[in-house]
Amino acid sequence: MFDNISSGLSKVFNKLRFQDDEKALKKALDELKKNLLKSDVHFKTVKELITNVEKETKEKGIGKGTFMKAIEDNFTKLLTAPGNYGFVFASTPPTVVLMAGLQGSGKTTTTAKLTNYLKEMKKKKVLMVAADLQRLAAVEQLKQLAEANNLDLFYDENSNNPVEIAKKGVEYAKEKFYDVVLIDTAGRLAIDEELMDELKKVKEATNPNEIFYVADSLTGQDAIRTAKKFDDDLGITGVILTKFDGDSKGGVALSIAHQINKPLRFIGTGEKIPDLEVFIPERITSRLMGAGDIESLVEKTNAIIDEKEAKKINKKIKKGEFNFEDFLNQLESMKKMGSMKNLLGMIPGMGQFSKALKEMDLENSSEIKKIKAMISSMTPKERKEPSLLLKANTRKRRIAQGAGLSIQETNKILKQFQNAAKMAKKFANKKGMPNINDLMKQMGNMKFPH
Ligand SMILES: Nc1nc2c(ncn2[C@@H]2O[C@H](COP(=O)(O)OP(=O)(O)O)[C@@H](O)[C@H]2O)c(=O)[nH]1
Ligand SMILES: [Mg+2]
């Protein structure tokens, strides 16, 4: 996230020494300006930010420290608008959320992502309502997402009235004591009155606590213009920017809150369900400054990794007893956390590497597929005791056949697994490394092809 801006900033900082003169400051400010404009931050926003940073740095005495502090403060200010941050629950459940936006902006995907986030991270009971009746396949899409990710969905195939369905959905959520209900609505290719009318009616009928405007970050300044229009016509309480993974510039995310005076709440960073990031200004600034975002990382890992389980695994690794079953379980946990690249960006000092590291795709890596096929061809006993396989050629042949692999491939993977377990054991005994690091180390040793 924000790779360009972040690496550009470190260059800007290096233009200044700890104590310096106006000329050096001017150079640094010029570099900052160029960097922000190149990242597609609106020029008025850039001008304002530069003026403030200059003023505040001079007030405190020109130097690297005061300059960095001024940038940090002004970035945070830029990212902040009046309103809620993260997900805020209504005092009386269910919290009703209306998802609005143009067609293809990512409303339906984001509805499922947000539902999954609230369920997995916040342990809430969440209902999705399929109120997009514009496109034939819209309800089907949400049904598939619900099924694949084990999410609850309300739909009504006998009705063709989105207002009625939304209303019924909220009533159902109240009856069944849901904490949150997310209403997925229809979009259009461009803003038209019919769409706004429908949304206004849905709003009236459901009295939502939040109206999220879902915008495609790839549409650049257009995303900001349409957000403003939706806010004027419908009233929104926050923005969710999607497809941020494809937005190499990142400037829209930096300036949208400031330009429309509504907070950016979440960012979609990929097509998969866990690819959703909470947007908290201070945390984002910290990432931009290259200082990582430990809070978000801890939140993610805490929700996913059960502490007891983590201790158990660590103990096993230390004893060299880490087996195939543990491997599969850990792999599932990792998957829930989203992409490796995003996680790395949250670790202090690692942000700069996240761009260089290719996306490690836990689901689609051919190596992982092979390992999974192999494990599923093992008996439960073999899964628990990898050592059983070391010299047992008949066992190995059976597994290779079951997994559709050659005996050489099977041998190679077994060997890698063994080495990884050994390495992990060594590391785990050396220092009380956190469990997640152990796992990354093992994975790193397995040399995934891309
Ligand atoms: N790469 C990427 N694709 C996304 C993201 N969010 C949504 N999409 C894709 O955008 C397309 C449109 O999404 P959809 O949810 O159907 O949009 P809707 O018409 O607003 O409901 C789909 O192919 C999604 O997979 C994201 O954050 N990153
Ligand atoms: Mg949709």
Image (cartoon, rainbow, N blue to C red):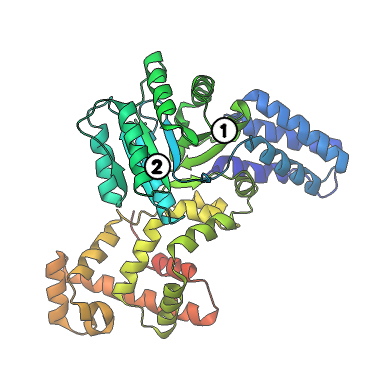
Instruction: Name the amino acid type tagged 1.
Output: Gly
- Give left or right: position of 438 versus 39: left
Please name whichever residue, 255 or 168, is drawn nearer the observer in this view of the structure: 168
Q: CA distance from mark 1 to mark 2?
A: 31 Å
* Residue at which label 1 appears: 251
Q: Is residue 155 above or below residue 357?
A: above
Quadrant field for ligand 2: top left
Which residue lies at the image location 25% right of the left edge and 42% below the top edge? 143
Relative image position of residue 136 (x, y in whole percent): 22, 28
Please tell me in which quadrant of the rendered image residue 337 appears: bottom left
Amino acid type, mark 2:
Val
- In the rendered structure, the answer to whether residue 345 lies left or right of residue 286 reads left
Report if residue 114 is visible in the image: no
Q: Is residue 395 above or below residue 331?
A: below
On the image, numbered disc 2 is attached to which residue? 181
Which badge, 1 or 2, comes first in the chain's sequence?
2
Q: Which mark is residue 119?
A: none
Q: Position of residue 161 (x, y in %)?
A: 28, 25
Q: Secondary structure at mark 2?
A: strand
The 10 Å Cα crowd at callout 1, few under 14, some 14 to 19, many 20 or more, is: many
